[in-house]
Image (cartoon, grey):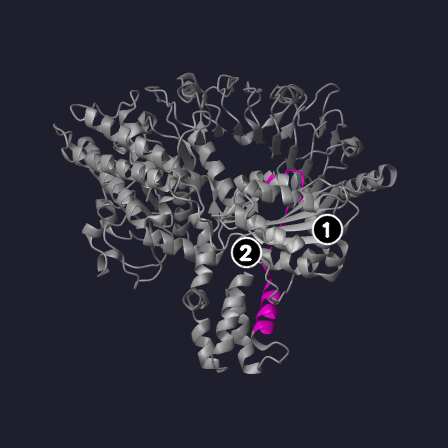
Amino acid sequence: MAYNLQSLITILQGILDPQQTRWILGPEKPQLQSLLQKASSLQQQILEKTPPLTKIPSLECQIRDVANEAEDIVESHMVERLLSMPEGVTPDVLLVTQKLDSLTQQVAELVEVERNKKPTGSSWSGASFSSSKSVVVGVDQDLKQLKDRLIGMQSKLEILPIVGMGGIGKTTLARTLYQDPLIVEHFSHLAWTTISQDYNMRSILLSLLRCINGSDYKHEGDGELKDILYRSLCGRRYMIVLDDIWSTKFWDEIRRCFPVNNNGSRIVITTRESDVAKYADSKSLHHQVQLLSESQSWDLLSQIVFGEEDWPHELQGIGEKIASDCGGLPLAINVIGGLLSKVERLKGVWENIGNDVRAAIAESDEQFSNILSLSYNHLPIHLKPCFLYMAAFPEDYEIEASGLIWKWVTEGFVKSNGDESLEEVAEDYLKSLVERNLVSVRSYDLYGKAETYNMHDLLRDLCIRKADDEKFLHVKNSPEVRFCNQLRRVSIHTSYRMEDDEYTSSSEMSLVRSFLLFVKLDRIVSPMVFTLRLLRVLDLLEMRKIEFPEEILQLVNLRYLAIDCESLPRSGISRLSNLQTLIAKLHDGSCPAELWEMSELRHLIMLGAYLRIEDDYMKKIVLKKLQTIQKMLLSPSVIRRGFLESIPNIKSLQICYEVESSSGKSEVVDLSHLHKLQTLSWISPFYQYLHVPKYPSTLRKLNLEDCVITPAATTALCALPNLEMLKIKLCIFKSNETEEEETNEEWEIAEGDEFSSLHFLQLHYLGLVRWKADETNFPRLRHLFIRGCWKLEEIPVGIGEIPTLQLIHLEYCSDSAEASAKQIQEEQQSEYGNYDLQLRVVSISRKRKERKMKTTQSGHI
């Protein structure tokens, strides 16, 4: 497929990068430069094409095969060089370059042919309203909200976008509104048209005009039809339904046909694309259609299959399971309901269907798959591999945003835009999939940022089929699943021994680039994995506590490695010179010195023991690409030896700072030169660190743990102009930086100290009794989160005066602190009419609270 070109281009750009030091190119350099030029030219031509290549599958397959072949040749050659450094060139590069040349010519000819064709449009485009009745369940609240907006007092023209994934019931909801007698009576003109992906503007205009005046205009041009439509609606209160919009281009073409009458006219649009709804009217509230609950799904299935009849008792259990397995998607329930209506009402027959409901839906109604496939077909080229990669994750799996993004980057799916990092571009890709209702946000962090994602089961089934059909990725979710030839990516969801699998051979696996394991094992899944020398992504995190396999050090093409192991190898890891992301759950945090010689590293994540840099660390190279370090022990001697200067572009840093036992003192740590640092977690065991670090002004998110907070420290924090999130956990408060000073039970923020940009403040497990502050110290605070501050007497009353404050959240705090929070909320409501401030309180039993108080008073939290 055409998206394969980006991965090839990324590989070639990395090899030809003049700043890379992993290999010295010889006579093959001109060939690789020519290959890059041809691949880039073909990609550009495809991106600027007029006809979609999806209409010519044979050409798409040719592009996929040639791009894959080129990848295999180039990466095999480079792997051989890294392993044994042979001399010479690879003649096969010339052959694939010629093939790309031929494909470029074919695409150019295709574009020319399509430009000379007359537009025909889709057979669906402009389809008028169908009066067929649909069973509607679970949308009473939706209908009420939308009806209020349609016939409300708002006089200006309003656009009402109805947004949701394919098959969720957007059209049914709009049709129900369109047929409502109150709506029909309210508007003098109602018109409905269906747009589709490949719309025909003339058909759409004629469809709308037939609804409005019943006339059929055969001789007028498109411009005249637009004028007629505009004049027909002038001075009239109208409601237009534009069903199934896919592009902003369509809205630009038709928006001027609708006069702004200021008489309560409305335009309803249905779309799967949130960005289209936002483009049509950025100020209008989108109505996001939700999936049905299990009870609503059961109700809908009952009405479709039995109508007013009683559901037979012996079929109720299996019927409820079938309804549940539809995942709340009305289209799926309608399809399976139609199938159940036609089969015998026998428990055995229904159980056969219930054994695999999703397969029964796909097999019984091809249109169902086609409806969901429209969303994939409409994706721009750069998003297709990102969507297909989602097939790798098991059903109901919570997909962490960071890991997913790093995998996309290492696979070469992400194209730099010159302004943002690859990770930032990939984050935009993920947001686009959410806005297109193909991926859902599963959970948010405390700051309201999306943290994990998932995919509807039926969309996931589509994703797995597409990934398999396009030879992109293969999922092994049962021992019986057979792999095809020339696998590119493999995801294992079932426990089995690969070497015992009669369907899997080393030749079939030899070209695999991603190997992902999602089943917990206490053994190596197969020695065959370590023979896959072209691997880029190897995720073995579910293999519990293994010895680091030395064979991994031969996988020199690796870009992403995730592993649960005792420790990292003391030597040899630098052979993985292409490695970009290392995620290791370590039980021994000893750090091999070679790790700091790996120039391609971008993300270093420790999930178990802290990574300990030895005191004899010597700075050898500057790791310009390193962005993330999580869980690292750092000592003053390592800092003095220049470690912080070796990571100038770090963005996220989690440090446990250990004072050297020999000196017993801590030094001021200067981080101010880390101009890209945005997230810092600073931990100082046993409150050893008494000084204020010199923070960079770029800092946005700061977590302080086991630290000493002094007035000077507070003033330093206030001086950070971009600090938006602050978490203070298990810290103690002192009035100065001397070690002899007793712990202070008060945190007083001085007059004039202002957290000018702080939005989120978290206070966790502090021994505070009194906190003195007011609205001038936190002028932009939105959320205040306090947990386990058992001794805190009250929240400063001035906190309630902060105009931006939205939430006070208390967990396991004293009764008096809870009472003060409630008083703040009551005063805001009674005196200022502020009902926007929310209060959430999680209390604990009095006995447990007293036990916690005693623990706190003993000096430990």
Query: Residue at coordinates 39% horizontally, 17% vertically from top-left?
Result: 641
Question: Residue 175: within the magenta?
Answer: no
Query: Residue at coordinates 53% horizontally, 66% vertically from top-left?
Result: 333
Observer-nearest of 105 and 578: 105
**Residue 5 pos. (x, y %):** 31, 37
Is residue 735 visible in the rendered structure shown here? yes
Disc 1 is placed on an element classified as helix
Observer-nearest of 629 and 147: 147
**Residue 57 pos. (x, y %):** 32, 49
Q: Is residue 828 above or below residue 15?
A: below
Q: Which residue is mark 2?
A: 127
Q: Is residue 292 above or below residue 765?
A: below
Question: Residue 294: within the magenta?
Answer: yes
Q: Which mark is residue 639?
A: none
**Residue 297 pos. (x, y %):** 58, 66
Is residue 567 visible in the rendered structure shown here? no
Q: Which residue is mark 1?
A: 150
Badge 2 amino acid: Ala
Q: Which stretch did the figure color magenta? A: 280-304
Q: Earlier in the sequence, mark 1 or mark 2?
A: 2
Query: Residue at coordinates 69% horizontally, 36% vertically from top-left?
Result: 784
Badge 1 amino acid: Leu
Count of residue discs: 2
**Residue 754 pos. (x, y %):** 70, 22
Crowd rating for badge 1 (residues with CA inside 10 Å; few <14, some 14–19, many 20+)? many
Q: Quadrant of the N terminus?
A: top left
CA gap between label 1 and label 2 equals: 23 Å
For residue 5, side relative to residue 328 (left or right): left
